[in-house]
Image (cartoon, rainbow, N blue to C red):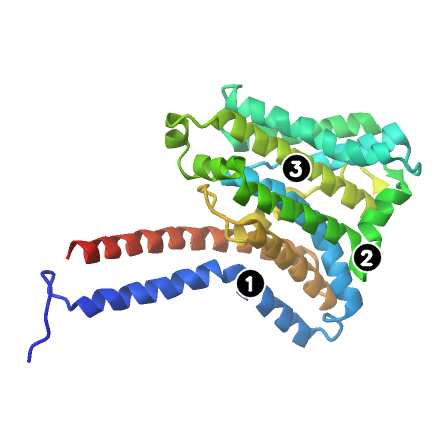
């Protein structure tokens, strides 16, 4: 008996099988950050005897806290189809501002507010220039702001490095709570707050809508400009928080602080599965992305590999993440087409 064949000359089971294969591949892409992290931990654990130790894992979490903080804010910006490459220079500006205004070794609760406040101001300027200043190119605006902020940091510090940090900031960056780094716990709480805002508030749903289709979002009356400005403002504030952790970790305030961290932040977001096309991604995967970066750096250090190779690995990671993002979009489009055909038959 001949099998039933549809109008296209193919068995209906062929389409169903193709959908199943594409669905599995899509699931693997979505679970990619977790798979990559587990693979890296196992590999480095086998190659470096001391990699999986309490002390090293504590250091890994403490190191990842800075990138996590940066990644949380960067995710909001990428979610609305933007990017902020000025966050590294915001770290420098925040630490030298605090060191200059409060002194490097004076305990001051006000200092804890100055870090995010400096970043918030820079973020607001970025957002304003992008949505109101007639420069709708986030990369151009934030590259220019990177140079401006770095220059201001040099002017404030006179090009000097101020050694020392307040005890409160030092504890936040290096202290332990129940054996876990205080900085990592603080960032975890911050990530939980971000998750609630994005998943349980109208503001969060609107951000996803603006990133998914900004023209439609504006057409239906969403405050697109204000949403974009809020994303950049929060991104700046989290860069200031990262500056506080950086200041506490290094114990010094240099106008050259934070160089290269903008790339780490973007990598954490895209390796974590967020789309540079906007409208897609999750806070949880941003944390996984930051942990992947910290794991690569720590693992290579344990193996006595030149730290320059970690930069190479991160660059390759960005390229692969972009290619996988394009592949994911292609698979999703293909799945929608196959499902539409099934419904029409």
Furthest-bottom residue in view?
A: 1
Disc 2 to disc 1, how far (Cα)?
Answer: 25 Å
Q: Which label lies toward us, 3 or 1?
A: 1
> Disc 1 designates what residue?
34
The foreground one among 32 and 202 is: 202
Residue 160 seen in render: no
Q: Secondary structure at mark 2?
A: strand
Q: Residue at x 72, y 58 (%)?
A: 61
Left or right of 339: which side holds 236? right
In this rendering, is residue 31 above or below 193?
Answer: below
Q: Which label lies toward us, 3 or 2?
A: 2
Disc 3 to disc 2, how far (Cα)?
Answer: 28 Å
Neighbourhood count class around disc 1 (C-alpha, 10 Å): few under 14, some 14–19, many 20 upward: some
> Disc 3 designates what residue?
87
The foreground one among 150 and 72 is: 72
Q: Secondary structure at mark 1?
A: helix
Quadrant position of residue 169 = top right
Q: Earlier in the sequence, mark 3 or mark 1?
A: 1
Q: Earlier in the sequence, mark 3 or mark 2?
A: 3
Picture quarter with the C terminus: bottom left
Furthest-right residue in view?
A: 106
Q: Residue at x 66, y 37 (%)?
A: 87
The foreground one among 144 and 342 is: 342
In this rendering, is residue 68 above or below 243?
Answer: below
> Disc 2 designates what residue?
177
Q: Secondary structure at mark 3?
A: helix
Residue 236 seen in render: yes
Q: Earlier in the sequence, mark 2 or mark 1?
A: 1
User: Do residues under tags 3 and 1 come within 8 Å of each other at their CB atoms?
Assistant: no
Neighbourhood count class around disc 2 (C-alpha, 10 Å): few under 14, some 14–19, many 20 upward: few
Q: Residue at x 43, y 62 (%)?
A: 27
Disc 3 to disc 1, how far (Cα)?
Answer: 26 Å
């Amino acid at each position: 008996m001949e099998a039933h064949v549809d109008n296209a000359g193919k068995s209906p089971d062929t389409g169903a099988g193709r959908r199943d294969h594409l669905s599995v591949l899509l699931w693997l892409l979505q679970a990619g950050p977790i798979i990559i992290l587990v693979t890296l931990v196992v590999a480095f654990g086998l190659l470096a005897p001391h990699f999986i130790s309490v002390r090293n894992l504590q250091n890994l979490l403490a190191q990842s806290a800075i990138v996590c903080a940066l990644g949380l804010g960067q995710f909001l910006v990428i979610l609305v189809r933007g990017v902020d490459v000025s966050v590294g220079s915001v770290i420098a500006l925040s630490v030298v501002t605090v060191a200059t205004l409060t002194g490097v070794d004076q305990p001051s609760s006000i200092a804890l507010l100055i870090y995010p406040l400096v970043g918030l101001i820079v973020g607001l300027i970025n957002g304003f220039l992008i949505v109101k200043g007639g420069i709708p190119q986030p990369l151009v605006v934030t590259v220019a702001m990177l140079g401006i902020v770095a220059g201001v940091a040099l002017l404030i510090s006179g090009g000097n490095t101020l050694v020392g940090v307040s005890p409160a900031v030092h504890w936040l960056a290096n202290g332990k709570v129940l054996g876990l780094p205080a900085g990592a716990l603080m960032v975890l709480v911050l990530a939980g707050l971000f998750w609630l805002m994005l998943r349980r508030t109208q503001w969060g749903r609107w951000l996803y809508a603006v990133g998914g289709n900004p023209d439609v979002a504006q057409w239906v009356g969403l405050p697109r400009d204000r949403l974009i400005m809020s994303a950049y403002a929060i991104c700046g504030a989290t860069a200031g928080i990262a500056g506080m952790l950086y200041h506490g970790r290094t114990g010094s305030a240099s106008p050259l602080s934070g160089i290269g961290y903008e790339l780490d932040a973007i990598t954490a977001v895209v390796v974590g599965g967020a789309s540079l096309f906007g409208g897609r991604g999750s806070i949880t995967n941003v944390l996984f992305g930051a942990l992947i970066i910290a794991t690569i750096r720590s693992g290579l250090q344990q193996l006595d590999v030149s730290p320059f190779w970690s930069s190479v690995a991160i660059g390759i990671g960005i390229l692969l993440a972009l290619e996988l993002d394009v592949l994911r979009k292609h698979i999703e489009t293909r799945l929608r087409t196959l499902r539409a055909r099934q419904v029409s038959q």
